[in-house]
Image (spheres, grey):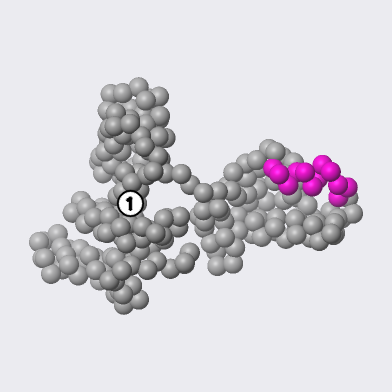
Amino acid sequence: MSNRVVISGVNTASLPKLKNDEILELLKAVKKGDEFARDKFVVANLRLVLSVVQRFSGHYDKADDMFQVGCVGLLKAIDNFDDTLNVRFSTYAVPMIIGEIRRYLRDNNSVRVSRSIRDVAYKALQAKERYIKENNAEPTLEQIATMIELPLKDVVFALDAISETVSLNEPIYNDGNETIRVMDQIADVKNCDDEIFEKLSLTDAIKNLSEREKEILLMRYYIGKTQMEVSEEVGISQAQVSRLEKNALKSIRNFID
């Protein structure tokens, strides 16, 4: 299920794939008011909506609803996209689609947030979207607070209150072999695996590791760096760091067992 989204009434396997030049031609026709081109362009970008729905892997029970809401975001993106800018339509549309889906999930969250806090949060989100549209860049929280004339702490509190809870096991990247999850992005100065290092003598086990594996374990479990920080320091991808780390821990456990 993690690699597939099933949408009721939509044969996702038959959705068309357009080349970039075809997309540009359709966009020009859409901006001229061609309704047939608009319908064709919407259908051609339904795969984009599906790709966004896949990111919300913890809500597959709401896949149909998220797909419909995502289509609303797609339509908004089509209406607001400026084809004179040197920006791909997908680059502009994805944040719009994500925003619509997140709003839907927030409004249907089992954790209830007071109306006044939600109002502040929605004002902040609207200000953010307006800023992005006008400046083609993400605003800071300070800028958002200034735009809606509210204290920064109120804006931060409101946005935190309506934010969606994310599982530590939520996948955020896959290079085809290794899946990077949220927990792999978090620096941990007291990781539970430290218990292995504290309670057992690992000298012999560590001797069997490669120099690169020893270096990664040192930075991850003694210094407390994230996998991203390690990858930047040693000059390899985060997926490679994750793979080497897991292999090293597996070797240590096998040696101890």
Secondary element at tag 1? helix
Q: Does the magenta stretch include residue 239?
A: no
Q: Nearer the viewer, residue 46 or 6?
A: 6
Does residue 54 appear in this view?
Answer: yes
Residue visible at 35% across and 22% down in the picture: 151
Q: Is residue 29 placed above or below 216 in the rendered structure? A: below
Q: Which of 104 and 94 is in front in this view?
A: 104
Q: In this view, does 243 lie to the left or right of 113?
A: right
Residue visible at 52% across and 56% down in the picture: 171
How many numbered dots are placed on residues in this image? 1
Q: What stretch is highlighted in magenta?
A: 191-202
Rendered image quadrant of residue 249: bottom right
Rendered image quadrant of residue 157: top left
Q: In this view, does 216 lie to the left or right of 5?
A: right
Q: Position of residue 129 (x, y in %)?
A: 28, 42
Q: Is residue 79 left or right of residue 172?
A: left
Q: Nearer the viewer, residue 84 or 30?
A: 30
Q: Quadrant of the C terminus?
A: bottom right
Residue visible at 45% across and 58% down in the picture: 57
Residue named by callout 1: 101
Q: Is residue 60 placed above or below 217 in the rendered structure? A: below
Q: Where is residue 124 in the image (x, y as percent from the top left)?
A: 31, 34
Count neighbours of disc 1 (C-alpha within 10 A) and say few if under 14, some if 14 to 19, many if 20 or more: many
Q: Where is residue 213 in the image (x, y as percent from the top left)?
A: 75, 55
Q: Is residue 196 left or right of residue 122?
A: right
Residue visible at 16% across and 65% down in the picture: 38
User: In the image, what residue type sits under mark 1?
Assistant: Ile
Does residue 209 appear in this view?
Answer: no
Q: Position of residue 73 (x, y in %)?
A: 26, 53
